Amino acid sequence: MKVEIWSDIFCPFCYIGKRKFEVALEKFDKKEDIEIIYRSFELNPSAEKHNDKNIHELIANKYGITYEEAKLNNDNIVNQAKELGLEYNFDTLVPTNSFDAHRMIHFAKEYGKMEEMTETLFKAYFTDSKNVSDFNTLVEIAENVGLNKEEAINVLNSNKYSDLVRADEELAGRYGINAVPFFIFNEKFTVSGAQPIELFLRALNKVSEEEKSLT
């Protein structure tokens, strides 16, 4: 079974959805047969790499709400994440651009480390308050997941994997995906959003049953 997951490193519900799916996967009796592919999606492709506003200010401006309302909304997300063992630090989070982080995920895929890179980038952004568009930070993350430092530097100083990021985004457009996380099972069944664990488990079992009926 193939599961494609469209997400953005900067999407708090994508990290929550990822963890919920993983919990469901642990309860699925054929998890070793699952191929998981992370697909690129930029929530804000025009985001600046360096920003003088914090995430509460940016959310308030984006949705036309007060700073206090934005912070309250973010606090609610923090609590949702905490229930899954995730630590979100919105007050010190560093808003930036996610394009190069997506390129690094494709780089990691070449060495079978796509999941590790995705997880580490989420943690770096939401928990560790790192600037995940900074090349030094991305190289450090690449090393931490077992990738070659010099090769990571070469990737970042080139346009390598940019075409794969764009291809994922174009594919999302063809599927009509306009919000993430978005999960597609065997290019047929879909789950949109950070749904309950039980729903992910039902989706896995449903697709598995269909596969059995076709053999």
Image (spheres, helix red, strand yellow):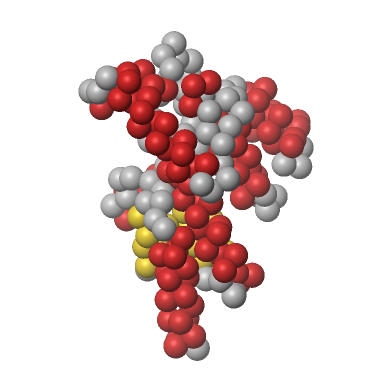
Which picture quadrant has residue 141? top right
- The answer to which image quadrant residue 25 occupies is bottom right
Residue 25 appears in the figure: yes
Residue that appears at 25% across and 23% down: 65
Q: Residue 109, percent across and down?
A: 62, 49
In the figure, is residue 88 to the left or right of 140? Answer: left
Q: Residue at x 72, y 41 (%)?
A: 145
Residue 67: image x %, image y %? 32, 18
Q: Determine the residue positioned at 28% across, 52% down.
A: 176
Q: Residue at x 52, y 71 (%)?
A: 1
Whole-percent x, y for residue 190 in the image: 36, 62
Q: How many marks?
A: 0
Q: Is residue 178 left or right of residue 205?
A: left
Of residues 184 and 82, the one drawn nearer to the viewer in this rendering: 82
Residue 75 rendering spot, x and y as whole percentages: 42, 31
Give the farthest residue toward the left: 64
In this rendering, would 144 be left or right of 165? Answer: right
Q: Nearer the viewer, residue 55 or 5?
A: 55
Q: Is residue 117 placed above or below 174 in the rendered structure? A: above
